[in-house]
Image (spheres, rainbow, N blue to C red):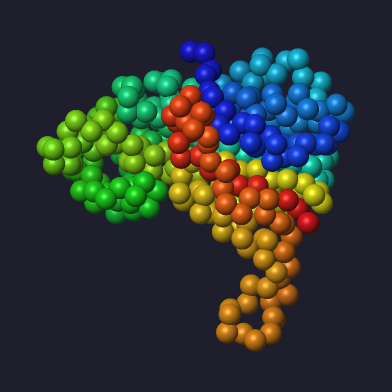
Amino acid sequence: MEFKHISVLKFESIDGLNINPDGIYVDCTTGGGGHSLEIAKKLNNGRLICIDKDTDALSFAKTRLKDYSNKITFVNDNFANIDLILDSLNIDFVDGILADLGVSSYQIDTAERGFSFMHDSRLDMRMNKSQTLSAYEVVNTYSEEDLSRIMFQYGEEKNARQIARKIVKLREKKPIETTFELRDIVKSSYPPKFKNKTTLPNKVFQAIRIEVNNELNDLTISVEKMLSKLKKNGRLCIITFHPLEDRIVKNLFKLHSTDCICPPKIPKCICGHKADIKLITKHPIVPSEKELNENSRSSSAKLRIAEKL
């Protein structure tokens, strides 16, 4: 299957990087290479580090970016390891970092990757196909309590307890192996009036995907590392697609852009905390009406930008 993915907020994020043609930049989530291509076009003697934990994505990106290969280093790894990656390349600091946290259209639409309930396939959902934990293990080995917690916390699924209970009961007879089996369990946990609502399993599938790929924990660790690797005046652009992701980025940006973080009741600062970034976007940038019309999957995207002091 051809790797297809439409880069979200592409030009807004590239503008946000404020690219120096001779600078060093990192695309933490290369995907189909849409953002990377636009960065590479703006570089003269600069360098671009393209990271992705999906080997399919990197293979496609290498072909798409072949005209700029002399400026690019491709790395198959998790962006949570950005500090180790840059250290291994003898790079102390960079001029800009971009992270698009969305799942690629290729991953969603490739049936055998097991991300979508629109295609019947074995439960998988691994962005890194070499890792052990998959959706199959989560669904078939996690306790009822953990399944309920994941679906409620990561998916805001109101019927989490009922769905978890049904999963545990049914897997006692046989393992739950496919996306359609999980989809049908979710649908059967709702009253008949919801039977025609095709997007009903969205929240459950999203929650399990987040758990499989450790997305929220990786994000918290990664943002701290990204900020530490920026040069003075370097920019960090992060595109989120989920309220929990956006909240993490928003709160970390707020913390790092604030001097004193003492409780309000303390009359004099004793924390000694100093801001090390300034916010370029006080409010997130969202897709234009034109982009929404061209790509409905961009509807939940939010771009936040910070600059190192």
Image height of 131 relative to 272, above or below: above
Q: Nearer the viewer, residue 133 or 247?
A: 247
Question: Residue at 13% across / 41% down in the picture?
Answer: 191
Q: Is residue 41 rendered to the left or right of residue 181?
A: right
Q: Identify the residue at the far left of this view.
A: 192
Give percent across and percent down for residue 268. Answer: 69, 85
What is the number of callouts on the image? 0
Question: Residue at 53% across / 17% down in the picture?
Answer: 3
Q: Is residue 299 rendered to the left or right of residue 58?
A: left
Q: Is residue 264 rendered to the left or right of residue 47?
A: left
Q: Quadrant of residue 37?
A: top right
Quadrant including the C terminus = bottom right
Residue 173 in view: no
Give percent across and percent down for residue 219. Answer: 56, 48
Question: Residue at 45% across / 27% down in the picture?
Answer: 293
Q: Nearer the viewer, residue 83 or 266?
A: 266
Q: Identify the residue at the far front of this view.
A: 289
Image height of 218 relative to 273, above or below: above
Q: Identify the residue at the far bottom of this view.
A: 267
Image height of 113 relative to 158, above or below: above
Residue 57 in view: yes
Q: Quadrant of residue 136?
A: top left
Q: Is residue 291 rendered to the left or right of residue 148?
A: right
Q: Quadrant of residue 90?
A: top right
Give percent across and percent down for residue 287. Answer: 53, 36
Question: Residue at 57% across / 84% down in the picture?
Answer: 265
Give percent across and percent down for residue 188. Answer: 17, 37
